[in-house]
Image (cartoon, grey):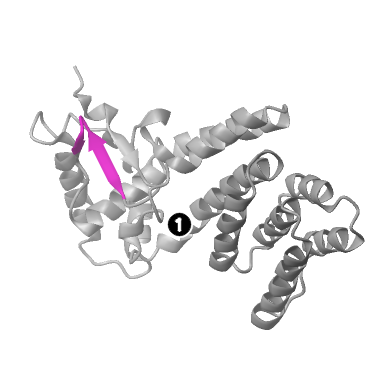
Amino acid sequence: MEHSVDRARFRLLGPLEIIRDGHDRTPGPFRQRVLLAILLLNANKLVTTDAIIDQMWGARPPRSAQAAVQMYVCGIRRSLAGDRGDPRTHSVLKTGSAGYLVAAEPDQLDVVRFRAHLARGRELLGAGGCERAAAEFRMALSLWRGRVLADLARWPEYDRYARYLEEERLSALESRIDVDLVHGSGAGLIAELEQLCASHPYCEGFHRRLMAAYCRSGRRAEALAVFSRAQRVLRDEVGIEPGPALRAAQRTILRGHDENAALCRHVTATRDR
């Protein structure tokens, strides 16, 4: 009978964390955590030893790289097994003919659960179930515990993986904000969007949504000031003009024709950043 290590929870949306039976089984050594992250990011797929070496050390691996990978695998298995059972047999970390894989069910991986909530939310939103969609978006975002794989930031391949996961988080956040723009409260949303615009000054989607939130509160002048600020940042720091979606939002406000409703429709129909 397999040990309950196979029901471990793997968390990547924040510092790497492995929880089993209420205990933290995260490997301590940095390179063991890097190897485990590589396998978890490719869960249920065989990752060849050559690919692991390339992702861990790049173009100049040490001569002992293959032996080091084997040693790290043994260390990870010991961490996962804890003080019970044989780590060679009681582990989700499997050895294949040319590499290794982590065998995990969807509910064991926070990344998979995040994407499932996000997909359900968008499906519900498309069917008009705004409240249920918002709940799914919030559940998706609640799985994030901070910067993705924050403890592995000095890993040379970190940016390649972290960037697309962060993009998915921002997309989920935009989806949740879109629902709140139409059905939620205004004041808290403005404060949140002001912070997001400061953190992501080149993200035109957040600027558009902030303009819509100000209009929803009847603060037309402040909505126009958001456009001016975004235009200045894009011109001075990136050397580009605002995109067509942001310019269309400005024109809607300047016309003064039911700007709040028009902007909300415009924002929720537009997904570009």
Q: Quadrant of the N terminus?
A: top left
Residue at the (61%, 32%) spot, across then down? 133
Quarter occupied by residue 5: top left
Looking at the picture, how far across and down is residue 256, in whole percent? 89, 58
Residue at the (56%, 60%) spot, across then down? 196
Disc 1 marks a residue whose amino acid type is Ala
Viewer-proximal residue, 197 or 98?
197
Q: Is residue 24 above or below residue 211?
A: above
Looking at the picture, how far across and down is residue 8, in whole percent? 27, 32
Left or right of 146? Residue 121 is: right
Q: Quadrant of the C terminus?
A: bottom right
Q: Is residue 75 above or below residue 162?
A: above
- Report if residue 138 is visible in the image: yes
Q: Is residue 169 magenta?
A: no
Label 1, secondary structure: give it. helix
Q: Is residue 19 magenta?
A: yes
Left or right of 120? Residue 24 is: left
**Residue on which the image places disc 1:** 162
**Direction bottom: furthest residue:** 236
Looking at the picture, how far across and down is residue 181, in whole percent? 68, 45
- Please name the predominant secondary structure of the magenta segment in the image: strand
**Direction left: furthest residue:** 83
Q: Is residue 102 above or below residue 230?
A: above
Left or right of 100? Residue 168 is: right
Residue at the (74%, 73%) spot, across then down? 228
Q: Is residue 88 above or below residue 218?
A: above
Crowding around mark 1 (Cα neighbors within 10 Å: few <14, some 14 to 19, many 20+) is: some
Magenta residues span 16-23
